[in-house]
């Protein structure tokens, strides 16, 4: 067993961890469809799926089976290559971004020192999924949807980045673990970076195209928008991709503003995974609650809100944060 | 919100208003008109085709004008036997004009000979003549000179023949068996190809290439089989053309093959959310023909049930309206409320959505024991829920931003397009038939007519929410003051006739037998009744030739003109505004296409 050097063992363990995280996220994403439907049912005075298995839990299995066995049909008028590529991008871009999330002190896929930037890059890529899907579908509803989506994503990513710069300035690092550790030693960033949190949360919802920022797929207007021509597993990838987006943004919110795997006041540090999971689920539920409770603004109102309200707010937040950091910096530290 | 300060003063209703006849005679001379005696409650005047356009323009431009073309349709007179004293006609086209300022109507009729079915168009006088004239052409084959776009409207473009003609078969068994040949299929497919020019759409220049978006006939927000072609510039709607007819079932033709009694269930399905509300104008019109005066209890029961259906229809509207602007939850709650209402309706009538429960001269049964408890529960339940909807959904700033100022029109525009109901009252026009022209005993009730003033998508919703509260008030008064007495009029034409004496009295038995087997025979005449239905003014204009079946049943539905109005309101708005607007109109396609 000479090849089983400590390095190799490390690699194997790391790969195993990656696979576990990957599976957990994908399965979690799939499971969310069931959870969302049950939660919506609960809030809407009805049952939701409750027939398959105990509490309807196997509904997800039934849905997956259905999706897997559906014919993988391409409409004759689509651009096949791009049409196939779009759902792959949709699912993988946000899935890859998950690799920078530190789940606990010891778990996590990659510990990049530019973790946040990596997330922005991946979120930026995900807009291509919508763009590709809308363009290649050769369908006017899809086209309108993807136009809305690209305009919306581009404008919301502008201040999504800026919203987090406050965090970066305060912590002094792009590394997620540094940010979590900073919060464990100081305050959770939700308090000093409250406006950053608000705007990032809004941008996060927008980037995942979740209600109320689902203009690109607004059922009442565009009858599903950019993925109107998709069926079977390709549609399923968009579907799961959306839920992965929710998990990702929720996990990011927890990591950046709510102390990551730490409990409040560093309570019960041995339960770090539980803390992380609990806080993430809270935000996931918030996503669903948002969908259940508010109407959808008009597309141009969304753009206006982004540019005229959120962007100035993030800039202001960044400026104030920077000023405060500079004020507290020890004399001579700033050239 | 519910103030009555309106620019238009609505005087008390004037049935058979002879003022306009005097004015017309003064202007055109008494020889120009032939007056017809009817039970329609309005003067019916025949004019010659040459004078038609002048007469219509005159009526439109009078002081206190007839600003609404309420209805326009035709009658195939060729088989009609009882038309003494009327001008010779193979076909008749009638123009039913309504003046809100006078609160009275007038009907102008034109006689046409079979070889020369041609009239000047009235589209330049009332914009909503457009669709009505298309329908007359579609159904009767009468052409309108100068009409901008005289094509089929309810029937498919490839249809042969004109269904409302008396020589056109009414039943499938009278046709040759249907077969689809390849040639026919190709013809149909070619006809379905979208050519913007054929729809009357224009490009503004050679350099501009607009995008056409086909919305419907299957679209989540089209509320049924409704199609609307949008001409877009980005997200802005440059022009649009509504396309109807996908839900056409030929209800008016069916009426000519059903007995007066057995047509009642068909009326339920005209506005399929209106339930017995649809029976009401029909039954009231038949009773006018028959000369039946119903007992007070019948009126009160009818009002109560009609208001129940106003509530269920408005609740469905409210839920889907909020859903159309993107909030998914309230629709489930309003449906829960509807179920509660249907529980009461089912206990009383035995059915839920389409009870077909009103009868000529009464209702089907007496109220069941314990009905008052059920009604009371509902009356106590709903107001609290309405408060919640207002607080949780209608005051939401996103919803307001989506609907306030969207798809706005004023009273004059509404009247010129034939808009009625909440769509008219949201512009500040206090015209509710229950107050303006009380029927079925509405004058005995204490309620208010909710008004709004902006005439936008939001106000249309608010008006309906307030109407539900008023309906609750009316139901509550029915509950407290339900009269004693019979549930059927004691009249020979009451159908089904009272059965108590049939086994003691041979004449009664014979009448009963004939009425149940052949149906009642209505005296030859014409009668008309309009009511404030769930979606606007709904009316039945019945022509009897002295038979067991109607000679002509004209069903004027509110949703039809409401859809015709869409392009004039929505041009220049965005796609999302159109969706909010469609949601706020509150139409069902069955009510449009009949």
Image (cartoon, helix red, strand yellow):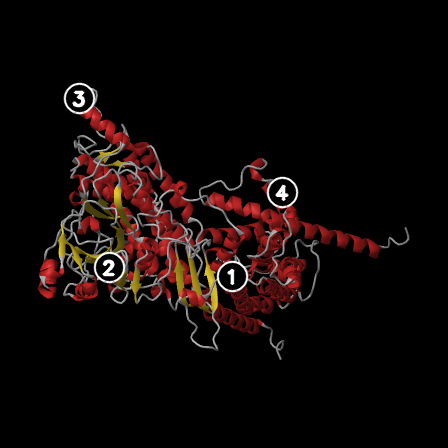
Residue A117 falls in image quadrant = bottom right
Instruction: Look at mark 2 in the image and give the residue it sits on.
Output: B69
- State whether discs 3 and 4 lie on one chain: no
Expressed as whole percent of the image width and height from the top left, the position of residue B461 reads 33, 54
Instruction: Look at mark 1 in the image and give the residue it sits on.
Output: A141
Q: CA distance from mark 3 to mark 4?
A: 72 Å
Instruction: Please tell me how crowded label 3 is: few (under 14), some (14-19), or many (20+) other residues with Cα within 10 Å.
Output: few
- State whether discs 3 and 1 lie on one chain: no
Instruction: Look at mark 4 in the image and give the residue it sits on.
Output: A61
Instruction: Look at mark 3 in the image and give the residue it sits on.
Output: B505
Secondary structure category for the residue under label 1: helix
Residue B451 shown left or right of residue A261 in the figure = left
Q: CA distance from mark 3 to mark 1?
A: 71 Å
Q: CA distance from mark 2 to mark 3?
A: 50 Å
In the orientation shown, which residue stands out farthest toward the front?
A: B115
Q: Chain of mark 4?
A: A
Q: CA distance from mark 4 to mark 2?
A: 59 Å
Residue A4 visible: yes
In front: label 3 or label 4: 3
In front: label 1 or label 4: 1
Residue at 48%, 56% (x, y): give it. Answer: B188
């Amino acid at each position: 067993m000479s090849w089983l050097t400590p390095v190799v063992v490390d690699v194997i363990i790391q790969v195993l961890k990656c696979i576990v995280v990957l599976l957990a996220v994908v399965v979690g994403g799939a499971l969310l469809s069931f959870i969302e439907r049950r939660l919506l049912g609960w809030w809407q005075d009805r049952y939701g799926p409750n027939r398959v298995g105990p509490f309807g839990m196997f509904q997800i299995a039934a849905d997956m089976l259905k999706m897997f066995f559906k014919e993988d049909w391409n409409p004759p008028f689509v651009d096949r290559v791009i049409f196939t590529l779009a759902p792959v991008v949709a699912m993988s871009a946000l899935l890859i971004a998950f690799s920078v999330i530190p789940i606990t002190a010891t778990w996590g896929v990659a510990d990049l020192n530019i973790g946040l930037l990596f997330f922005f890059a991946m979120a930026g890529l995900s807009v291509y999924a919508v763009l590709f899907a809308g363009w290649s579908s050769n369908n006017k509803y899809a086209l309108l949807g993807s136009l809305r989506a690209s305009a919306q994503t581009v404008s919301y990513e502008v201040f999504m980045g800026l919203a987090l710069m406050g965090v970066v300035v305060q912590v002094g690092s792009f590394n997620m673990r540094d940010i979590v550790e900073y919060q464990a030693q100081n305050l959770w960033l939700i308090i000093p970076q409250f406006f950053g949190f608000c705007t990032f949360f809004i941008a996060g919802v927008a980037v995942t195209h979740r209600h109320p920022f689902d203009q690109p797929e607004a059922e009442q207007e565009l009858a599903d928008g950019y993925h109107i021509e998709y069926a079977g597993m390709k549609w399923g990838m968009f579907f799961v991709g959306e839920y992965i987006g929710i998990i990702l943004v929720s996990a990011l919110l927890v990591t950046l503003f709510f102390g990551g795997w730490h409990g409040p006041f560093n309570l019960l540090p041995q339960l770090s995974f539980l803390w992380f999971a609990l806080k993430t689920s809270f935000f996931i539920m918030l996503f669903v609650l948002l969908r259940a409770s508010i109407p959808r603004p008009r597309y141009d109102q969304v753009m206006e809100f982004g540019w005229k309200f959120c962007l100035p707010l993030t800039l202001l937040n960044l400026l104030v944060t920077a000023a405060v950091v500079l004020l507290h910096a020890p004399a001579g530290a700033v050239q | 919100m519910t103030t009555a300060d309106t620019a238009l003063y609505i005087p008390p209703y004037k049935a058979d208003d002879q003022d306009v006849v005097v004015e017309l005679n003064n202007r055109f001379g008494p020889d120009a008109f032939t007056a017809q005696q009817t039970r329609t409650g309005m003067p019916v005047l025949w004019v010659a085709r040459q004078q038609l356009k002048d007469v219509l323009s005159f009526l439109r431009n009078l002081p206190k004008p007839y600003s609404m073309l309420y209805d326009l349709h035709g009658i195939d007179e060729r088989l009609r036997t009882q038309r003494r004293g009327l001008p010779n006609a193979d076909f008749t086209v009638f123009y039913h004009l309504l003046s809100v300022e006078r609160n009275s109507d007038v009907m102008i009729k034109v006689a046409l000979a079979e070889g020369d079915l041609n009239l000047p168009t009235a589209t330049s006088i009332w914009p909503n003549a457009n669709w009505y004239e298309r329908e007359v052409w579609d159904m009767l084959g009468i052409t309108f000179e100068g009409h901008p776009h005289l094509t089929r409207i309810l029937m498919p473009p490839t249809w042969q023949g004109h269904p409302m003609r008396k020589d056109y078969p009414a039943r499938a068994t009278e046709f040759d068996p249907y077969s689809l040949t390849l040639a026919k299929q190709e013809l149909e497919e070619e006809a379905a190809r979208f050519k913007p020019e054929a729809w009357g759409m224009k490009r503004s220049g050679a350099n501009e290439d607009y995008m056409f978006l086909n919305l419907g006939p299957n679209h989540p927000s089209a509320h049924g089989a409704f199609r609307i072609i949008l001409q877009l510039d980005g997200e802005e709607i440059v022009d649009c053309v509504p396309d109807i007819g996908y839900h056409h079932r030929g209800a008016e033709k069916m009426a000519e093959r059903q007995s007066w009694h057995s047509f009642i269930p068909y009326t339920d399905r005209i506005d399929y959310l209106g339930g017995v509300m649809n029976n009401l104008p029909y039954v009231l019109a038949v009773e006018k023909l028959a000369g039946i005066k119903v007992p007070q209890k019948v009126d009160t029961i009818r009002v109560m049930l009609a208001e129940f259906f106003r509530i269920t229809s408005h609740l469905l509207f409210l839920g889907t309206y909020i859903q159309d602007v993107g909030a998914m939850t309230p629709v489930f709650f309003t449906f829960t409320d509807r179920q509660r209402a249907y529980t009461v309706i089912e206990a009383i009538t035995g059915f839920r959505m389409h009870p077909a429960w009103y009868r000529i001269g009464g209702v089907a049964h007496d109220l069941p024991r314990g009905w008052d408890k059920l009604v009371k529960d509902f009356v106590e339940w709903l107001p609290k829920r309405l408060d919640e909807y207002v607080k949780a959904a209608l005051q939401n700033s996103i919803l307001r931003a989506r609907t306030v100022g969207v798809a706005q029109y004023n009273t004059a525009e509404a009247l010129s397009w034939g808009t009625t109901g909440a769509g008219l009252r949201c512009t500040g026009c206090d015209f509710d038939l229950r107050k303006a022209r009380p029927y079925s005993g509405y004058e005995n009730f204490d309620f208010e007519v909710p008004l709004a003033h902006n005439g936008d998508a939001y106000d249309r919703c608010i008006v309906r929410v307030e109407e539900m509260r008023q309906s609750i008030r009316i139901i509550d008064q029915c509950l407290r003051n339900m009269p004693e007495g019979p549930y059927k009029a004691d009249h020979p034409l009451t159908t089904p006739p009272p059965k108590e004496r049939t086994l003691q009295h041979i004449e009664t038995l014979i009448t009963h037998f004939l009425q149940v087997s052949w149906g009642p025979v209505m005296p030859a005449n014409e009668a008309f009744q309009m009511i404030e239905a769930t979606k606007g003014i709904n009316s039945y204009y019945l022509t009897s030739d002295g038979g067991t079946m109607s000679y002509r049943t004209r069903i004027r539905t509110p949703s039809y003109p409401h859809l015709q109005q869409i392009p004039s309101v929505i041009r220049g708005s965005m796609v999302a505004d159109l969706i909010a607007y469609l949601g706020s109109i509150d139409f069902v396609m069955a009510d449009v296409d009949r």
